[in-house]
Every structure is written in C-alpha cells, then in structure tokens.
Image: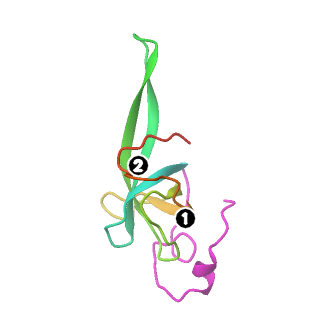
C-alpha cells in the first residue's frame, strides 16, 4: 500500500498475529489520520478523528469528532498526542476494525483530549 515496514517489525522478536506487517491481517478500505488520546489498553489505542459537518439551514459547518479504537502493534512506540495513520482491516475484536500503519511524533502541547485538528 505504500507504507514502509518499520525496522522493529522486520528485526524484532515479538509475536502479534494482528500486526499488518508480520501477522495475518490485510489492510483494505479506508485509510485516514487522527490524534492518539489514550494508550492505556494493551496493544490498543484510542484515536480521535475530527471532521466538519455542514448545516444547510445556517450555511455553516460544525465541529464533530469520533473516538476510534485502533490496534497498535508492538513495533510502534506511540504516546498521547502523536498523529497516527490507520488503515481499515477485518474485525479484530468487538470494537477494533483499524490498524496503525504509520506514526508521526507528538506535535501538541498540553491536553490532547479537546484539541480539534483537521488533516
């Protein structure tokens, strides 16, 4: 798909069957970016996806967001505030349907939870 395999994935000795680089998961469907707002789960992060919704009556946009659970392979070092590119895959659990493909380091100072950023 055009995403380079991380060095940790090719040289690391971890076992993750849900990893898009070493496991049995193919990426298909949507690919988008978002901000990491929580890394408290084991191998799963919460991603905030911001977007604008058009209101025809007032001829204006309103800000909206969704929090999306995403599987994060051990080959990535992710912290809160990082900008992450994710791709859709088959359902990995009850709520997880996306996988991390690329991580860009933190660019936000202060609280990450309420920041609105479009990509």
As helix, strand or loop, the secondary structure at mark 2 comes to strand
Residue at the spot of label 2: 48
Q: Which residue is at a point 36% across and 65% down the rendered structure image?
A: 39
Between label 1 and label 2, give the one nearer the viewer.
2
The residue lying furthest to the top in this view is 57
Q: Which residue is at a point 46% across and 36% down the rendered structure image?
A: 51
Q: Count residues near mark 1 (Cα–Cα under 10 Å), then give few for <14, some for 14-19, many for 20+.
A: some
Q: Position of residue 63 (x, y in %)?
A: 41, 31
Magenta stretch secondary structure, dominant: loop
Q: Earlier in the sequence, mark 1 or mark 2?
A: 1
- Label 1, label 2: how many angstroms apart (C-alpha)? 23 Å
**Quarter holding residue 49:** top left
Q: Position of residue 98 (x, y in %)?
A: 45, 58
**Quarter holding residue 28:** bottom right
The N terminus, quarter of image: bottom right
Which one is nearer the viewer's eye here, 86 or 92? Answer: 86
Q: Which mark is residue 26?
A: 1
In this view, 19 is above or below 11: above
As helix, strand or loop, the secondary structure at mark 1 comes to loop
The total of numbered circles placed on residues is: 2
Q: Which residue is at a point 56% across and 77% down the rendered structure image?
A: 22
The C terminus, quarter of image: top right
Q: Which residues are magenta?
A: 1-29
């Amino acid at each position: 798909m055009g995403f380079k395999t991380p060095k940790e994935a090719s040289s690391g000795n971890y076992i993750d069957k849900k990893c898009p680089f070493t496991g049995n998961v193919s990426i298909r469907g949507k690919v988008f970016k978002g901000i990491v707002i929580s890394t408290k789960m084991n191998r799963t992060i919460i991603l905030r996806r911001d977007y604008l919704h058009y209101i025809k009556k007032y001829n204006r946009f309103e800000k909206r967001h969704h929090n999306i659970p995403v599987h994060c392979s051990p080959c990535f070092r992710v912290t809160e505030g990082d900008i992450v590119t994710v791709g859709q895959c088959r359902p990995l659990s009850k709520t997880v349907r996306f996988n991390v493909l690329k991580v860009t380091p933190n660019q936000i100072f202060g609280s990450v939870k309420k920041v609105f950023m479009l990509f």
